[in-house]
Amino acid sequence: GAEKIRWKMQAAYGSNLPALGDTIPGVLDDLREVTDNRIIIKHFEPNKLVPTLNITDAVRTGKLEAGYTWIGYDQGKIPSSTLFSAVPFGMEPWEYMAWWYDGDGQKLAEEIYEKNNVHPVLCGLTGPETGGWFNKEINSLDDIDGLKIRYAGIGGRILQELGASVTVLPGGEIFQALEKGAIDASEFSLPTVDEKLGFYEVAKYNYFPGWHQPFAAFHLIVNKDKWDAISDADKKLINLTCQASVTRNLASAEAYQGKAIEFMKSKGAETRKLPDPVLHELEDVTEKVLKQEADKDADFARVLKSQKAFQAQYQEWQDLGYLPRDF
Amino acid sequence: MNASIEATAPELEPAPQGLSGEVLPHTPISRVLDGLIRHIGEFSAWLWPVLMLVIIVNVVSRYVFSQGFIELEELQWHIYSAGFLIALSYALLRDNHVRVDLFRERFSFRTQAWIELGGMLLLLGPFIGLLLYYSVPYVIDSWHMNEASSAPGGLSHRWIIKSALPLGLGLVLLAAFSRFTRLVAFLAGSEVRHAD
Amino acid sequence: MPINEMLAIGMFASFILLIFTGFPIAWALGGVAIAFTGLAMLSDNYLDTFIAIDWSYTSLAIDRIWGTMSSWVLVAIPMFVFMGQMLDRSGMAEKLMLNVSRLFGRLNGGTAIAVVIIGLLLAASTGIVGASVALLTLLAVPVMLKREYQPELAVGTVCAVGTLGILMPPSIMLVMMADQLAMSVGDLFMGAVFPSALLGVVFVLYIVIRGWMRPDVAPAGNDAEPVNFGIILDALKSILPPAFLILAVLGSIFAGIATPTEASGVGAFGATLLALANKRLNRQVMREVCRETSQTTAFIFALLIGATAFSLVLRGLGGDEMIADALHGLPFGPHGVVICILLLTFLLGFVLDWIEITLIILPLVAPVIHTLGFDIVWFTVLFAVCLQTSFLTPPVGFSLFYCKGVAPPSIGVKTLYKGVTPFILLQASVLAIIFLWPDLVTWLPAQAYSGQ
Ligand code: NA
Ligand code: NA
């Protein structure tokens, strides 16, 4: 198609955040360059047009043509969205990629989002985030009881079940709240991002693993009417560019985490791993919470079932084909 | 103007210069609308001490009993946003929005009335009208999708607080319409001046 | 020049012209946003441009208002207003005035110095400029005139001191700025402490020096009683309640016990208890406080709603990039850019007040400051000090309005203008000091984080 495309797109993360916000500007540059300025999607930084949590709303109602976001933010309206973006004790990134492209992932996401007049394109993917920054040691579940913690999404629900007092502070307030002891702990993002935000200056322990999100997926979401209006060739082009971006994003997210962790250690951050019994208990609660959510929402149940089935058949291969983790 | 409003008239505000409620005649429409808006505005003003108490309860429970309630935290901004949205019309009723009086005080009352009439038709009306027009589907959407807070333990039924938006904007439009009728009556040269 | 940029300039120009008609600024902002959405659509239709904004784009204002509604940070604004209104009626200020001015009665410029000290205490315990200026004018100006102060010095002092409330935390202006720039309210509060205290010190120095050089402009009260133990005790007793409030509000924020929002609720509650203790609290007072809180909150948020639509459309027209390019293109180097922004802010302050400037100009210039590598807290505090002068600069200076509204009839506009001029210069020199010594701003917030 020779039609010009001129869209406005707002991102959920600042383009200064490595492997988180710097992904989508590259996609838009690629699209512009390969089409010789025929496809120009204008990039807006977070909150420039709409509040971050409202990006999907704005796209759905056609006020914005496109957005780049972690669609789990929609969970107040589309409960299953969280399964497409991060699941506690869920799939690993390449497993998610397999489920998305070769399993039912993409089909289900398109079906559920298109009911909401939005077309989702997987366009960014990273591995686990850190388990969080703590000013208290976690040796057993009792240490979670009464903990004041900032934790977003289903992970927060799970900690709440265990007696934590969970808040969802805006990103800009986390630093001070941790420093001042208004909260005891917080999760935010990848080590490279946490380093940039300086959490190591105000929290003692950096806990791993990122049990609450073994993968984090990000989507380019496009208003369905706008998506339908473009040519098949352009749809293909956007899909391809996003597939390339998923690969690049995963690579860049994996590339520098080790360095970031080393740096933060050198600044005095104590890296810790959550004890196995705690992880097992967290997993049990996760099962319970996911089941509760599935009972409440049919789409959630459908997606969860598909993921579980995919994970079960994958497990076979993972156990046999790969070297054991503690080898 | 109502006597009770006079009694609470802000002694600390700059003295009203120009076209005040005193000068503008009331109309049958404005009497009804102003009464309605005044009652709603004065009633909603009691939200502020309620907000204060919710904060105090939350602070005490967090620091004394070490138990924070996300519901109470969310309730805080629910009360605050309902409070300021409803107050918009109340402030319009009392002509208490910020303006630059520099030249205005030199204009005759008729000129001021014409300017305000034009402003309402060309600026306030279209602006509030557009917001109102788009805020109704905004609420219906939220209701349809059964929107709840995405925070764990947050409040459900988001459409209720979102309704404060069209409610507040609708009241602003009513308050503006009421003042509009008074301006027209004034410009039409109505001799009727009500002190009440 | 591309059409979208012409529209962006036209948008700003129409707004400035429209506000001089005296139509409420909030609705002028919103109306201009609608009008220029329409013009952009016409331009796309007939002039073959690609601005790509339409009604549905401008209706993003709804989402932005929802962002304001669900803001935890902004909840502090009505609560700080409530606190101010309640303090205003609690009788605290009268007691302060009575007892503190007796301490300085025998000094040249003593009453004016007392005004500064009371103003600082009021500023740190509340933040409503209108209330502070009116109170100080009502209580102190007649006393100073009776003591044969030069009227210019008398009104200049109360006007300038009254504005300290907007800078000295807790401050609704700083809350609003923190919200606009997604920065920590606590940081900004801490950053503003020394600059606002410095302003107070500079005011006192000025009065002392003037009183010493020309005793006739601020004569000591010949009727004043000598300072004795009883007077000191009374003064201390009257300082206790505001000191307690300051400790409860600012202390709890700085110590990290409470978020600014929680502190605002605690402050409102404290002010209510204070009014109760002074036997000033009754149903009528409560009702007045509630209604005044509604009024003030309403006009602030009306401006926020208008400005959010205005900024949205301006951004859609490419106004943001235009400003950023223009600032980056200035040939003066990074510090020169900051000076230009502050100068522009100072000039805009003659006709606009802090709310519009904070809502429209600050978000336009802050990203540029970021890219130039300056500390954003430092810049924001500079911006705040600069905005403080907008209360004093005619023709639209709210301190002047409030003072004129309640001052004795002998005080004319000329006296007011002449009275505030030296204080505007003092504020400008403090601005320069902060500009040259950023540590004044950045030291305290940094201190807070080094304890780890
Ligand atoms: Na203050
Ligand atoms: Na001014």
Image (spheres, grey):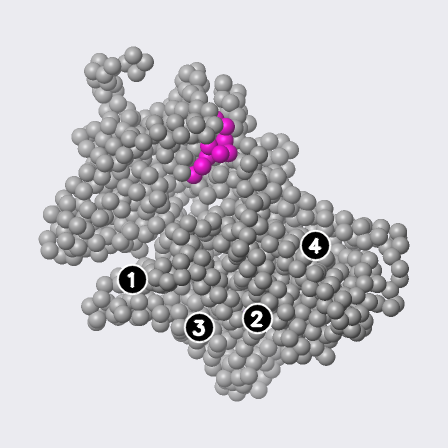
- Helix, strand, or loop for circle 3? helix
* Residue at the limit of the structure toward the top, as seen here: A327
Is mark 4 in CB contact (under 8 Å) with mark 1? Answer: no
- Helix, strand, or loop for circle 1? loop
For this rendering, which residue is in front, C192 or A313?
C192
Q: Position of residue B126 (x, y in %)?
A: 39, 69
- Helix, strand, or loop for circle 4? helix
Mark 4 or 1: in front is 4
Have a look at marks 1 and 3 and say if they share a chain: yes
Name the kind of residue labelled 3 in the image: Ile
Query: Which of disc 4 and disc 2 is earlier in sequence?
Result: 4
Q: CA distance from mark 2 to mark 4?
A: 24 Å
Have a look at marks 1 and 2 and say if they share a chain: yes
The residue indicated by pointer 2 is C393
Query: Which of disc 1 and disc 4 is earlier in sequence?
Result: 1
Q: Position of residue C131 (x, y in %)?
A: 66, 63
Assess disc 2: are there few (<14), some (14-19) or many (≥20) residues with their C-alpha within 10 Å of its C-alpha. Answer: many
In the rendering, which numbered label is found on residue C53?
Answer: 1
Q: CA distance from mark 1 to mark 2?
A: 37 Å
Image quadrant where one finds the C terminus of chain C? top right
Mark 1 or 3: in front is 3
- Helix, strand, or loop for circle 2? loop
Name the kind of residue labelled 4 in the image: Leu
Is mark 3 in CB contact (under 8 Å) with mark 4? Answer: no
The residue indicated by pointer 4 is C121
Marked residue chain, label 4: C
